[in-house]
Image (spheres, helix red, strand yellow):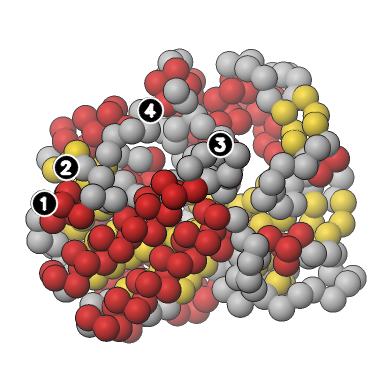
Amino acid sequence: MHIVITGICGFVGSSIALELLERIPDITISGIDNLVRAGSERNRLRLTRRGIRVLHGDVRVQADIKRLPHADLVIDAAANASVLAGTGGDDARDLFDTNLVGTLNILEYCRGTKAGFVLLSTSRVYSQRALESIPLRNLDTRYGLDASESLPDGVSLHGISEGFPTSAPISLYGASKLASETIAFEYGAAFDFPVWVNRCGVLTGGGQFGVASQGIFAFWINRYLRRQPLKYTGFDGNGFQVRDILHPTDLVNLILKQVAQPSSAGRILNVGGGPANALSLHELTQWCEERFGKHPVASDPGARPYDVPYLVIDSRNASDLLGWEPRMTSVCILKEIADHAVAHEDWLEISAA
C-alpha cells in the first residue's frame, strides 16, 4: 500500500506517517511539504531516516502535486490551521490558496489516480454565533453545559455533534475547510473515488510546534515550563474556556478503520477526545503547577476574535459506525507533551520562530 500525506513535516502529518509505518507491513509512504514552518526541517530528517520520501513542494502549486508518485490513499494534512488566519494584517487569499486551492489540486491528483482521499477538516466549521449561544454554567474551574436549560440541536452532554449548525460566520479558516469538504465529496462522486472527511478537534502531543495557533496545549506547557509569560484572554480572563484533546495515534486508528470499511466513505465524522478528555486552560495551569511548580498567569478579559467558551467534540457517530473510541487519555497526552518539553530545552527556539 502506498500512502501520500500532504503537510507531512507538520506535527500531525509526521505523527501520522510514523504511526502508519509502525502499523502497516510493506507500506510505502511519501509526502509533500513546503517546509516553511519552524521545526518542519527537523521532522523532515526524522521521516527520511525512516525511509519516508519527502518532496519539497507546495500543495498550492499544481506542478508540484503532479510530481507525487502514484498512491492508493492520500491524507490531506496540509493547512493553515489558525482560526485567526486571514484576519488582521494577514492575507486572506493566501489562506484560501492553501486550504482550498491546495485541496483542489490534491483532488485533481486523486481524480487521475483513483486514490482514496482523507480530508483532515476541523471542528471550527461550526457556527460561531451558535457556539456562543450554548447555555453554560460556571463549574469553578471551567465552563460546562447548563443542562437545566434547553440545549440547541446538535448539542448534548456528549458535546457538539455533526448536526450542529455550520452557518456563517464561522471564521475565514472555518469557511476554507467547510468549502473543502463540499468540493471533496463532489469530486469523489463525480470521478468515483472514496472520500472521508474527519472534523478533528484539538490534535496534540509531544513534539507539537510551540505556537499557540498550532497547538495551545503544547504551547502552554512549553512556555509554563520555561517560565515565559502566559495570559488568559477573554471570558472574564479566568481561563475557563474548554476544549477536548486527541492524540494523532487515535486519529490513525480511525483512518485505518475507515479505509478497511469502504462503505464508511462519504461520511462526515467528528473526531475528538470528547468530554472525558476535555479541560480548561485554568485546569491545564493547575496540571502544570503540579508538575513544574508555581508560575503566574496574567489575565486579560478583553475578547479575542473567534474564541469560544466551550467546544467539546461528540464522536459517537464514529463509534457507532466503526467502533472507534479514543484510547489515549488527556493525562497521558499532557504527560507526553511535558516529557518532550523537558527533554528538548530548545524546543521553543526551534519551533516557535
The alpha-carbon separation of the residues under discs 1 and 3 comes to: 33 Å
Above or below, 73 against 12 in this view is below
The amino acid at mark 2 is: Leu
Disc on res. 55? 2
Tell whether label 2 touches label 3 (CB within 8 Å): no
Identity of the amino acid at label 3? Gly
Kindly report which numbered mark, 3 or 4, lies closer to the viewer in this rendering: 3
Question: Residue 156 appears at what percent x and percent y?
Answer: 72, 72
In the image, what residue type sits under mark 4?
Ala
Q: Earlier in the sequence, mark 3 or mark 2?
A: 2
Q: Secondary structure at mark 3?
A: loop
Q: Earlier in the sequence, mark 2 or mark 1?
A: 2
Q: Position of residue 348 (x, y in %)?
A: 48, 21
Q: Amino acid at mark 1?
A: Arg
**Number of the label disc, if any, that sits on residue 38:** 4
Residue at 53 percent across and 46 percent down: it is 86
Q: Which image quarter holds the N terminus?
A: bottom left
Real-space CA distance between mark 4 and mark 1, rounded to the nearest whole angstrom: 24 Å
Q: Which residue is mark 3?
A: 89
Front tag of 1 and 3:
3
281 lies left or right of 320:
right
The foreground one among 265 and 50 is: 265
| Residue 79 image offset from top left, x and y in percent | 40, 49
- 1 or 3: tag closer to the N-terminus: 1
Q: In what element is the residue under mark 4?
A: loop
Q: Earlier in the sequence, mark 2 or mark 4?
A: 4
Mark 4 or 1: the one toward you: 1
Q: Position of residue 46 (x, y in %)?
A: 23, 32
Using the image, tell me which numbered label, if any, was put on residue 67: 1
Quadrant of the image occupied by residue 8:
top left
Secondary structure state at the residue bearing disc 1: loop
